[in-house]
Image (cartoon, grey):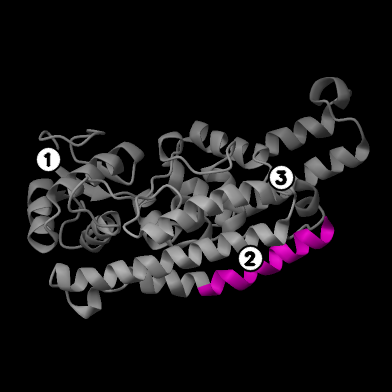
Amino acid sequence: MEYIIEELKYTQDLDLEFNIKSDSDLITIKNFLQICTYQLKHDKSQLSLFLRYATHGDVRQALEFFKGFLKSGYTNVDEISKHKYWTFQSHQVIKPMMIPDRIFYDETLSRIPNVFQLRNDHNSSHFTGLRILDLLNNKFGGQSSTGFVDVKFFIQEFEEKFSLTKECENYLDLFLRKGLIESSNRLEEYSNEVDQIKITAFGKYMFESLVFNFSYIDLVCLECGIYDEELNNFLIRSASEELKLKNNRKIMDRMNLRIERAERFIEYLEKQEENEVSEFNLEKADIKYSKKLKEVFNIEKEKILASATKNAGEK
């Protein structure tokens, strides 16, 4: 981005080279890129966090993510460029990165996996993915200096506690392909050849932050298999309704619908997690994921509504 800013500074014919028609457009573009550059230099910036952890240091992939961020239509370049010290909020980063050229999330077309998906036709849990990341995260940085754990022992341990061997294997395959975990022998798909596994920086970022974010929940819930028929029907209707509201530019109505959808999905997950305490003979202390989801959602909700209200006022 610093290179592009320099090019804009010294290029004689900006219209010919970059299709920039006016001085005001030039100022908007330069200001926006300078803000992004400043944000990327700060480790705690949401933009910096996502690009660093989701790309594993792959600059080409980071550029692809950033291109999607710019072209998605979710990033208000004009508004951002007016504020020198703009700070990107998590929802302003995650949605354009996850679905840069689509309205709804599709895991097969996204680099970001759905950790709440049911991945076995029989005997499946919405929390298998989270539990795998949780267990590997707890083992990371322990007595073993490498952070790797024996995969066969890990699956056996998971089976003894949750009786979900097949789903565990399906998630390990997904996480290896998406880069949330890595194998000691560098295999990128799960098989009997995989020896040891450990969580990656991207996996830690997903587990500690991304999966509890409103934008993530809002996107993935529409793709999840659901055990509750009433909720399933509501999610289908809400997707259709959201599309109509988007086309009619009903910003606040659309945001209220998305919030209701996320809220009902979290309530559903809360009931599912409570049921699994008796099903898997767990301790009450094991009910933690839906609790954190609700806590984070309640904090984010006010900021998101405030942002939507501002955008609706500008329209």
Q: Residue furthest top?
A: 16
Q: Residue at x 83, y 25 (%)?
A: 19
Between the C-alphas of marks 3 and 1, the distance is 50 Å
Secondary structure of the residue carrying tag 3 is helix
Closer to us: 228 or 6? 228
Q: Position of residue 15 (x, y in %)?
A: 87, 24
Range of residues picked out in magenta:
298-315
Is residue 245 found inside the magenta-colored segment of the image? no
Bin the neighbour count of mark 1 within 10 Å (Cα to Cα): few under 14, some 14-19, many 20 and up.
Answer: some
Residue 304, label in figure: 2
Which secondary structure class fits the magenta region best? Answer: helix
Q: Amino acid at mark 1?
A: Asp
- Report which quarter residue 207 is drawn in: bottom left
Disc 3 residue type (three-letter): Asn
Q: Which residue is mark 1?
A: 195
Q: Earlier in the sequence, mark 2 or mark 3?
A: 3
Number of marks present in the image shown: 3
Percent of width and height locating residue 26: 85, 38
Find numbered disc 1 in the image and state the secondary structure of the residue it sits on.
loop
